[in-house]
Image (cartoon, rainbow, N blue to C red):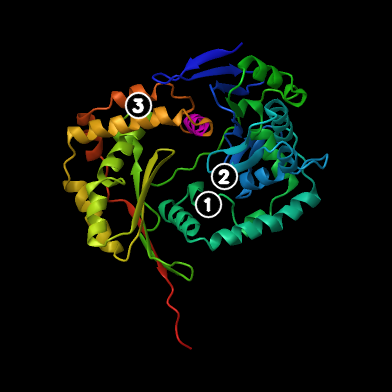
Amino acid sequence: MMNKLELLGIDQDIYFEKLDNGLEVYILPFKNKNNYFVSYFTKFGSLILDFYSEDEKKMIHVPEGIAHFLEHKMFEQEDGVDPFEFFAKSGTGCNASTSYKATRYYCMGTENLHENLDYLINYVNSPYFTDENVEKEKGIICEEINMLKDNPEWFAEEEMQRMLYQKHSFRIPIAGSCESVRTITKEDLYNTYNAFYNPNNMYLMIGGEVNPEEIIKIIKNNKILNEKEKREIPEIKKVKEPINVKEKYKEVELDNVKTNKLGYAIKIDSTMFKEKDKFELSLYIGMILNIYFGSTSIFKDEMLEKGYLSTLYLERMYVDDFLIIEFWAETDKPNELIKELNKHFKNYQVTKEEVERCKKVWISSEVMTTDNVEATISALINDIIEYDEIKTNKIEYIRNMNYEKLLKIKEKIDFSNTSTLILKNKEKKDD
């Protein structure tokens, strides 16, 4: 039986039901929308390489890049039907993506929702791996890996992960390497599929101008899904990652770098904040970074005026007990920029007015996001992946943020454990 959740402060309901086999279904009925978005995802990403296999009754290790490889192979069906071609017949887009923590399959369009939803469930629940088609895919994925190496931004992201982590699988590229991909077998694929593509580890979200009762009926009547039994989520082997970064400084020369780039990352033990609510802590960290270094910050304006940078953007993420903060900039003065960044963070005094202004902007952004079907579902997926639940009261969280707590959290951010990556253009030398 479906339960109804309400996104507090926003005129949006979510209908939720957990099926007997463990699949969690979320249905978001929108008004006056002619488009829909469907996402079917599993909490299985590239980070998981060692887990207990119920089939083999032992802890097993799988090759690096297997989550991404598995995503590719799900688009090859035993009946020969290409999912891309199936969806294209009704003008529907489809794709998939693998991240460090999850693999998502999705479709979006304006026509044939019921048929497309049923088909999406079917093909994601119909693995077809043979020695021949696995071998064929290895060359395709290896080409993709080599192409990504030529992308400076992609190279920089992966290089930074290698510099930050000593043991954690976060330091391994999502797609793996050509060497690891070549070792993948159909048995590896079935092992990981059976372990993590089981309904008890999967989620299905549908948003658009839909009737929740009709949608849940389609899902419950899906024959292939009905045959899937509930299985326990596998035990995943944990690696004890040291707090210190693996490498503090590196300069790399690349042919395809037009403007010098700086990556500056901080690795922080998040347990030092002693905050029980990970989501609330994430909000405060985000607000601190936004006020100090965001697109409308005094710091960015000053650095642009001094010519210390042309672009600057920030990222933050949680990896187990670590908080990672990354700064990325195009700059010809990377070392000077780092000094200015550290000095500004230490000396700049945030005001109560800045905190209140940021809160108003964030609340407005939350309200605007719910006018977009895909953006709303993407935000809810992120909640599940990062916090294991949908945060229905985000606006209330933001309203309750206060100046004093922000300052206390800010004081605990330590810039001593960092990695610096500088990408430079390789100068052509005369013969």
Residue designated by label 1: 172
Disc 2 element: loop
Q: Which residue lies under the disc numbered 2?
A: 46
Mark closer to the chain start, 1 or 2: 2
Q: Magenta part mainly helix, strand or loop?
A: helix
Secondary structure under the numbered disc 1 in the rendered image = loop
Label 3: which secondary element: loop
Q: Amino acid at mark 2?
A: Ser
* Spatial CA span between label 3 and label 2: 27 Å
Q: State the residue lying farthest toward the right.
A: 79
Report x, y in % for residue 6: 46, 17
From the top left corner, tell me how far across and down residue 241 is, in percent. 43, 45
Q: Is 369 situated above or below 138? A: above
Give, as a single range, the part of the protein colored magenta. 375-385
Report crowding for label 2: few under 14, some 14 to 19, many 20 or more residues within 10 A (C-alpha): many
In the image, 257 versus 227, the foreground residue is: 257
Taking 18 as reference, is 84 left or right?
right
Earlier-in-chain disc, 3 versus 1:
1
**Residue 161 in view:** yes
* Residue 143 at x, y percent in the picture: 65, 60
In the image, residue 376 lies in the stretch drawn in magenta: yes
Q: Position of residue 30 (x, y in %)?
A: 54, 22
Quick check: 230 left or right of 245? right
